[in-house]
Every structure is written in structure tokens, then in C-alpha cells.
Amino acid sequence: MSSTVTAKVLWPEDLLSPEREEFITLPEELTTRVQRLQEIVGGPIQALPIDTTNFMILNGDGKLQAHKVNVTATMLASIREAISMEDYIAGPAVILDKTYLP
């Protein structure tokens, strides 16, 4: 059994640096994984289903904080009908297989 979990992070963009995405490893141990996800998204996590096997993990309070709009995450969630066309994702988002959800 592996001691890590692979996930994809979609970082918000700004005018000076284009959006970044990267693959990261998360601890397999649940409590440590949740703490790491909270560090990445900058607050309490919210899991948004984006297809039958993956969830987008985001900051549940992201819109209330000084987070930038994450255009790529917003487009992905909107296309997958996980959010309405008028809604948006604020701050970093992590794409995670539902097997590893907290």
C-alpha cells in the first residue's frame, strides 16, 4: 500500500503570472491529508463533485476571503455542471480521486 496520494492543484492566475497547475503528493493518513488540503486551499475544505470519480477540493470560505478567482477551476466546475454558470471558484483548487476524500 502506498504512503502517498497524488492530486492535481489548480492555482489561480494573475496578470503577471499565468495560472499554474501541478501534481502533488498528499499523505495517505486521513488527518494529515486534511490538514495539508486546508493549507493548500487556505481554509476549511469543501468537496465539489466534478465527475463520477473526482472531486474538486476548495476553500469553503474562499469567496469571503481575499482569494483570486480561479478561472480554470471555475471553467472546469461549470463545464461539469458542478456550479452554475454565474458562480465561480476562488483560490486554489485540488482535484482528488473520491477514494481519498476525507
Image (cartoon, rainbow, N blue to C red):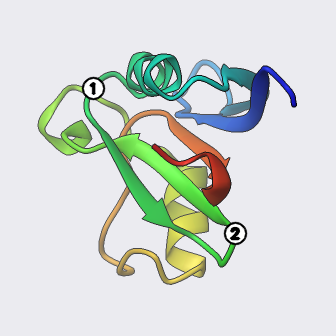
Numbered mark located on residue 43 in the image: 1
Q: Residue furthest left?
A: 64
Q: Does 62 sit above or below residue 88?
A: above
Figure quadrant of the C terminus: top left
| Quarter of the rendering containing residue 82 | bottom left
3 displayed left or right of 91 = right
In front: 34, or 7? Answer: 34
Looking at this view, name the residue that lies furthest to the front: 1
- In this image, 13 relative to 18: left or right? left
Q: In x, y percent, where is residue 93?
A: 52, 41
Q: Where is residue 37 in the image (x, y as percent from the top left)?
A: 47, 27
Helix, strand or loop at mark 1: loop
Viewer-closest of 102 and 80: 102
- Which residue is situated farthest in the right direction here? 1
Mark pair 1, 2: CA separation: 24 Å
Q: What residue type is labelled 1?
A: Gly
